Image (tube, coloured by chain):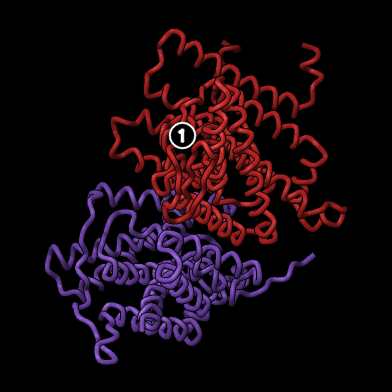
Amino acid sequence: MNYLKNMNKTTRSNMVTYLMVIVAFVIVQGMIATGSISSSLKGQLVPICAYVVMAISLNLTVGILGELSLGHAGFMSAGAFSGVVAAQCFSQNIDNPVIVLILAMIVGGIVAAIVGVLVGVPVLRLSGDYLAIVTLAFGEIIKGIVMNLYVGLDAAGLHFCMIKNTLEMDGGKMLINGPMGLIGVPRIATFVMGFVLVMVCLFVIFNLVNSKSGRAIMALRDNKIAAQSVGINVTSYKLMAFVISAAMAGMAGVLFATNFSTVVASKFDINTSILVLVFVVLGGLGSMRGSIIAATVLTVLPEMLREFSEYRMLVYAIVLIVMMIATNNATVKNALDGFARKFSFKKKSEKGENANG
Amino acid sequence: MEFLFNLISGISLGSIYAIIALGYTMVYGIAKMLNFAHGDVIMVGAYICFFATTRYGLNPLLGVLLSMVVCTMLGIIIERLAYKPLRQAPALAVLITAIGMSYFLQNSAQLLWSSSPKVFQSVVGKGSIKLFDGALSISFVTVVTILVCVIIMIALVTFVNKTRIGKSMRAVSEDKGAAQLMGINVNSTISLTFAIGSALAAIAGVLLCSAYPNLVPTTGAMPGIKAFTAAVFGGIGSIPGALIGGILLGIIEIFAKAYISTQLSDAIVFAVLIVVLLVKPTGLLGKKVSEKV
């Protein structure tokens, strides 16, 4: 207990976040063990983990680094496709699916990080809306390339080609079949692995944010010129945050893809990028806990609203607009605050009366 | 001859992008926000025109006018309800609201008009102009699209540069606070900008669906993003920039489709955008803003 009291505020807040994830995991595991979880929700568990990782990694770019990215799904796509190809190769020699998945995630993360460097070096020279549109463009380019990629695996090894399927293989199988995307994906993703990935990513981000580099990154967000004047290297720190964020998105992509037997490249388009951005903004910029909650709730919510399937996206849109106005408009905010104050005042006075009586 | 044909189709497609891009660029110039819902206003415009002409047999010209009126109202309502309360809010909040508006319009369209594709009857008569003894045939839609774009562009540049209201629009885009001190009604100027942008979106929607007749609730999404790209390409906030950006983008897209690869055309368009932005970070005609320290 004393140790808890002596911790500084940030550490305590981080611990709460870790604890929240662990408690959620234990509860869900308990529900699975007792069979009290619906099958549709059970199918959502791994995607939820993937979206949580996407949200916290994008939060690193948008909330901590302060640059708007509209192409985060592109990194997810790069990671997913390379990771699954790697998984197919590894699974020929390794039987244990957990080790295959871990290796695939590492490969997916590295490939996404390399793409992140390629995108980041030119892109981070720009700022604001220009940066947003260029990340959007990169996301679409990655999607366009992956949609025209053919990869096959046979005894001689991997075969690649673009645009038209001209692979010459003797036997073997297709891994990526152009617009049809990934086919015959080994479904090795598990909820436990998803949980581990969320924890690892949280650990990396919290430690980064509280390190010297993290403070440099946040200084860049708050005032670029001031940060530059005290000797912070703008490009290298920006790139650092951007690439770590990309690598995590790649790992999330591997987790996401290995949960389904087929995955098409158009799944990772601008709409997915925007969906993840919505998680981040609704959860609160820079708040990892908020991102986790928003990603979970907003992934589960449309499923729960299945019975109103026709109206659910409409409701979602209205909720989005109303939330933004309620949290950002000065008049509405003051009215809400005033209401809250009135309410709490009443409570106090009631207490007072009780005491007197 | 094939080259010339592709060039003209490119200019025609680019004209549609340019008209849409005008809406983006004007709104950005004045309200400093990315109006993601603009692409969906195009879709609404196309649906209104579709129902007016195909279902109720209205004169095509009246159909276009009706759809312009409806879209103008829609633009003003969207601005009043969703964007006006967020005048002072951070840019990201406004962006998310615009995205929410875009979802809202798409899903309302889906509920009202179902997601089954409608075949849009071109508002321009069928037929084509034959040049060089029939070696080159250009459809009327293509010609009308280019003409409409030129007329809109001239009208808009004159309006913004020569009239009193245009002057107040430029003033608001330059400095909102100072404009207000000079007695300009900032709110009504912003509303007017949305109205003009949305009316143009209606025209763009009708022209787009006359050339590519498949009409679904997501019709506006991709052209919207492309036109937004065009606006950035030409330098966002600049009206001539939107024209140049739009037309260049259209030409690049058609050429990439014809000579490189149909599937990779979108990727090529975006790659060109990135190259341009790296060489000129504020777009082709964008103003360079120097940072004050």
B99 is higher (above) or lower (below) than B220:
above
Q: Secondary structure at mark 1?
A: helix
Query: Most extreme residue toward the right, as rendered?
Result: A230
- Residue closer to the observer: A3 or A338: A3
Query: Most extreme residue toward the top, as rendered?
Result: A34
In the rendered structure, the answer to whether residue A180 lies left or right of residue B108 reads: right
The amino acid sitting under disc 1 is Leu
Residue at 54% from the left image edge and 75% from the top image edge: B238
Image position, residue A106 (x, y; %): 64, 34
Residue at 51% from the left image edge and 60% from the top image edge: B34
Q: Colour of chain A?
A: red
Residue at 48% from the left image edge and 64% from the top image edge: B228
In the rendered structure, the answer to whether residue B172 lies left or right of residue B103 reads: right
User: Residue at label 1?
Assistant: A298
In the rendered structure, the answer to whether residue A11 lies left or right of residue B1 reads: right
- Residue closer to the observer: B6 or B2: B2
Query: Most extreme residue toward the bottom, as rendered?
Result: B132
Visible residue check, residue A325: no
Image position, residue A286 (x, y; %): 65, 40
In what quadrant of the picture does the N terminus of chain B appear?
Answer: bottom left
Q: Which image quadrant for residue A225?
A: bottom right
- Residue closer to the observer: A260 or A31: A260
Q: Colour of chain B?
A: purple
In the rendered structure, the answer to whether residue B283 lies left or right of residue B47 reads: right
Residue at 61% from the left image edge and 67% from the top image edge: B275
Visible residue check, residue A88: yes
Image position, residue B13 (x, y; %): 38, 73
